[in-house]
Amino acid sequence: MAGKNQIEDAVSDLRAALRPRAKSIIVTVWGDSIAPHGGDIWLGSLIDLMRPFGLTERAVRTSVFRLQKEGWLTSRQIGRRSYYAFSQTGRRRTEPADRRIYANGLPPWDGRWHLIITNARDIEADTRDTLRRELSWQGFGVVSPGCFAHPAADVDALNGLLDDLGVTDQVVVMRGDGLQAATSKPMRRMIDSSWDIAGLSESWREILDHFQPVARLLETGDDVPRQTCFILRSLLIHEYRRVLLRDPDLPEELLPTDWAGTAARELCHTIYRRVWRPAEAHLMSVLETADGRLPAASQSFYRRFGGLKSGDKVAAE
């Protein structure tokens, strides 16, 4: 019992320290927990689900309303109840991120680079700013004005972005070999100037500082309450996503030898595999859809992080 109380206290302290914003944590919960199940979620049950994060009914209602306005969610009314679901736009926005978040490591690097070259005369200023921001979210570094580079870009996500912005015929997309070694001084200087490696390393270390104490408590094997597992899983993915989507996923050859991101990724995978099953049980006990209880998660959910096996060590349901 003491171990259980320690974990509950640690997760409570973690929530207080991280203090996620209402709309942001709802997006995380929807993408990580709700979307794999599908269905229209009754707003009242979502309010109950988010209450342990310290969110009031008003905060949840306001956030959901804004997410609908921004195109993330769709809604329908049945009697006096409002039901919400991920929109097609919401799914399209999250799919590239999901592929990165739940990947089980990075594939070997072939030594080649993707280059994106834009011409300021061909693209309006607002579109150019949007393109620059979205390429940054996809991990591209700014090598020089109008030139972006990435060693292992998600081609489908890139093509989708260019198509959405209507600039497919206005940018040059190239792929080529680096003629210098990844460890050469010019290559190191380019990487340091194109990406905030030092800042990202510090962010990864913060994740280790926040979640390693909880991971050590989980190693005791004590049963952890379902709701606590759900809160921990959501906070973990929320912080992991926040850093990961700023990380360009550079190959190991291009990173410092003491890169904190490697340990942080392993820690995230370990904690997720420990808590996902009781977190799912809590989720399905709280949420209601227009057809009743939340349906089971899709098969793609169980492929996260290389596979969520039924034999993984999780709290008893």
Image (tube, rainbow, N blue to C red):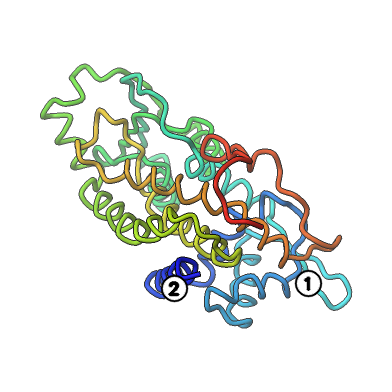
Regarding residue 110, the answer to whether it shows in the image is yes
- The residue under the point 42% across, 26% down is 107
Mark on residue 9? 2
Q: Mark 1 — residue?
A: 82
In space, the residues marked 2 and 1 are separated at their CA atoms by 34 Å
Position above or below: 237 against 92: below
Position above or below: 125 against 64: above
Q: Amino acid at mark 2?
A: Asp
Label 1: how many Cα within 10 Å (few below 14, some 14–19, many 20+): some
Secondary structure under the numbered disc 2 in the rendered image: helix
Q: Quadrant of residue 205?
A: bottom left
Q: Amino acid at mark 1?
A: Ser
Return the x and y of residue 273 as percentages of the image width and height. Answer: 52, 46
Q: Foreground residue, 242 or 133?
A: 242
- The residue under the point 18% across, 41% down is 192
Secondary structure under the numbered disc 1 in the rendered image: strand
Image quarter of the C terminus: bottom right
